Image (cartoon, coloured by chain):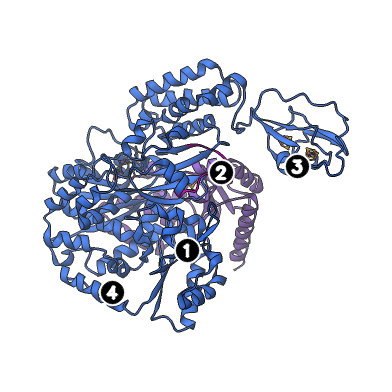
Chain colours: A blue, B purple
Amino acid sequence: MKKLNSVTELTQFREQLLAEQQGIKKSIAICEGTGCHAYKSAAVADAFEQEIKKRGLEKEILVRRTGCHGFCERGPMAKIFPEKVFYFQVKPEDVAEIVDSTLVNNKLVDRLLFLDEKSGKRCAYQHEIPFYMLQNQVVFGNNFMISPRNIEDYIAAGGYSALAKALSGMTSVDVLEEIKKSGLRGRGGGGFPAGVKWETTRNAPADRKYVIVNADEGDPGAYMDRSLLEGNPHSVLEGLMLGAYAIGCSEGFVYVRQEYTTAIENLPIAIEQAKQLGLLGQNILGSDFSFEVKIHQGAGAFVSGESSALMSAIEGRVGEPRPKYIRTAVKGVWDKPSNLNNVETWANVPLIVNNGSEWFRSLGTEGSKGTKIFSLVGKVKYTGLVEVPMGVSLRQIVFDIGGGIRNDRKFKAVQTGGPSGGCIPEKYLDLPVDFDELSKVGSMMGSGGMIVMDEDTCMVDVAKYFTNFLAEESCGKCVPCREGLRQMKRILKEITEGRGKQSDLETLEELGAFMKDASLCALGQTAANPVLSTLTYFRDEYEAHVRDKKCPARACRDLIVFYIDPQKCSGCGTCRKQCPTEAISGDKKIVHIVDQQKCIKCGTCLQVCPSRFSAVTKLPGGPAPASVPYGTAVVQKTKGESK
Amino acid sequence: MLPDQLRSKLREMIAGAESPREKAIDVMYAIQELQGWMNDEAMVEAAQLLAMSPLELEELATFYDYIYRSPVGKFVIKVCDSTVCWLEGQLRLTDYISSRLGIGLGQTSADGLFTLLPVCCIGYCDRAPAMVINKRVYGNLTPEKIDRILAQLAQKADFSGSE
Ligand SMILES: Cc1cc2nc3c(=O)[nH]c(=O)nc-3n(C[C@H](O)[C@H](O)[C@H](O)COP(=O)(O)O)c2cc1C
Ligand code: SF4
Ligand code: SF4
Ligand code: FES
């Protein structure tokens, strides 16, 4: 690759790349993100390449190994351009047929198209597939178009034109003002206006400054940063460079968690290619602007995603938070002013510089501009990454895009905002999703994880789970956080084990209020959210546990009861043989009985009882129904009477 | 003693850094890549290279989950215990792996093949429950799938052992 010495040379290079692609009639994008890769998408890509070569079509049909397409659950996916036809769960065996039908003869391969369960119809094109229909993939969209290991793809798709625009016609203040005007807010959780933070670092006097990408992505349930960084690393790098240009600095870091192996492989390749083209290094595109970037790997600590902790980690110190009275924007890495933004925040920057702040402001709500990528996971039918303009309702995300709840269960809640977020109940499903609206109902945006829960999820158990998680992550420095969480943990344990008292609920609320007011850092101040939000919206579940010793979701082991219906049991003995604790007694043609003292609630009997009998039921709790005396004969079914 | 080749690679890594300690994690990863874990000897040598006191390096090593100060198996099984995996029945699966390998969390199997560790979300939530073994991710886990994976890995270990 030849070094590009000016903006004009970059433009010429892009034109040349596009000219080379003139003869290409169609292209196939095959996702090789972590998700599809595990489903052997590489073999599918290989098969396409071979098949196309065999037919001598290399000059007309291009195969691209791209980043994540969002709908990982249905991978490996192949998207065919220019038609935007999607094939799902493609296997190497399907490839010859796709090439023959779709690429050569313009016919669809029906069985590989998405089947819309609601309408019963097959959907061929992106705009017909419910999962994609309502999305607006301005940040994520390029993942379809480029191979993350080939900078030429990014450039051909318009990449680095924002940097070129800045270097050739905008002062650093122009870039800063554009970002400030856009209203871009940080995507890493806090929602702090990016431009304002940049300006603080810009104005802090120092000989050296740093810009940093936070790719630690610690919030459970969120993985958009991984997909962006591994699928489109240059968009993050270009954003970072624009930030550096606006702030006036020439060095940067990407702090990435060790688990993200594909990102850690792709990023150095991207950096190396950018260097070769003169898009990184000294005098970028012949300008006065120079920039270098280093990668720093994490080593497994949730708290290291916090800004001051992350900076300590970069210096090779223990990644623990520092006191907040000195802001990292002023005094960060090596005590130099350091501006940290999240991966998705950086990826938005080139779009804003290219399209202008007006364009960005046209998307989203009054207080939250642009789009947001959510990871829609949990009990929803279609899981995956979803990019929508801010302000789209939860209902649209969960039911229209996500297809509603799996296995025909009922929706119960959607958890947003990471461990210290909240659980939002059905009555708020029409809430427009943005930073402020989520806070109003006691949750938060966090980094964009949306975990959908159904009727089988016990909300007390959920509160207990998050409280345990946070108790482990609490650094223990301040009493309200440390002791508050410990008390909450204990109370929730008792409630889920059937030893709760009515007064426990008030105690939880008091503890929560105290932690909110008296904790030192954000972790402690928000740590009560999971308990408080579930207490507010799902109080009846708490009361059922405390008052009736029942778990309505039938999830808490210590409360639920497995019961064999004497009217339905056929005495086949299947459950008796499989019960690990020999808790079931009975005999041929004799009604089987569960000894509640011995039962460990493993649920095996429920699973193995043949569906034509369905004699075992899981009850929410309370005393088990009186059992028939041992030796009672089964109810004989007369022929034809079954069900 | 660290092998010379690794030592010179580490020196090279450190030379490119602003201050040597910046590379502490990378250095320890490189050593672990070769020998699995950080024994006392490696700690002392690494600290020297990094111009840190052994105590300072020790502090880092204990803080981070992925720096191992005791021997680990050939395959480190990291099961995600975060929200989505928990919601999808991760507890039962971890129990299953535990009983299959006869080890608890944080332990290594007697044959030295497997170590079982709980980890925070690995970003594979759409295929929960999920786990990482060495650098590969596995999702949508079921007991049957775990049986298959463990058998495959044991076989692989056998194979490379006989080479
Ligand atoms: C305990 C804790 C963990 C955090 N983890 C992350 C993280 O993994 N990724 C991230 O982008 N921000 C994380 N943050 C937020 C960062 O401190 C910081 O606000 C953010 O990276 C700034 O970027 P943004 O303004 O672009 O969002 C965390 C904060 C706390 C308190
Ligand atoms: S739940 Fe498990 S332990 Fe209890 S009776 Fe059924 S099989 Fe036996
Ligand atoms: S498996 Fe079902 S029908 Fe058979 S003995 Fe058990 S409860 Fe009765
Ligand atoms: S919660 Fe387990 S991979 Fe994210």
**Residue at 29% across, 40% down:** A191
Going by the numbered disc 4, the residue's amino acid type is: Leu
Q: Which mark is residue A609?
A: 3
The image shows residue A636 at horizontal and vertical percentages of: 87, 37
Residue denoted by label 2? B88
Horizontal side of A372 relative to A594 (left or right) equals left
Horizontal side of A244 relative to B111 (left or right) equals left
Q: Is residue A350 above or below residue A276?
A: above
- Cα distance, mark 1 to mark 3? 41 Å
Which callout, 2 or 4, points to the residue nearer the camera?
4
Going by the numbered disc 3, the residue's amino acid type is: Cys
Q: Give whichever of discs 3 and 4 has the lower sequence position.
A: 4
Q: Is residue A541 above or below residue A401?
A: above
Q: Quadrant of the N terminus of chain A?
A: bottom left
Residue denoted by label 1? A124
Q: Residue furthest bottom?
A: A56
The quadrant of the picture showing ligand 1 is: top left
For disc 1, the chain is A
Q: Give whichever of discs 1 and 3 has the lower sequence position.
A: 1
Determine whether the residue tagged by mark 4 lies in a helix, strand or loop: helix
Q: Residues within 10 Å of mark 1 (few under 14, many from 20)?
A: many
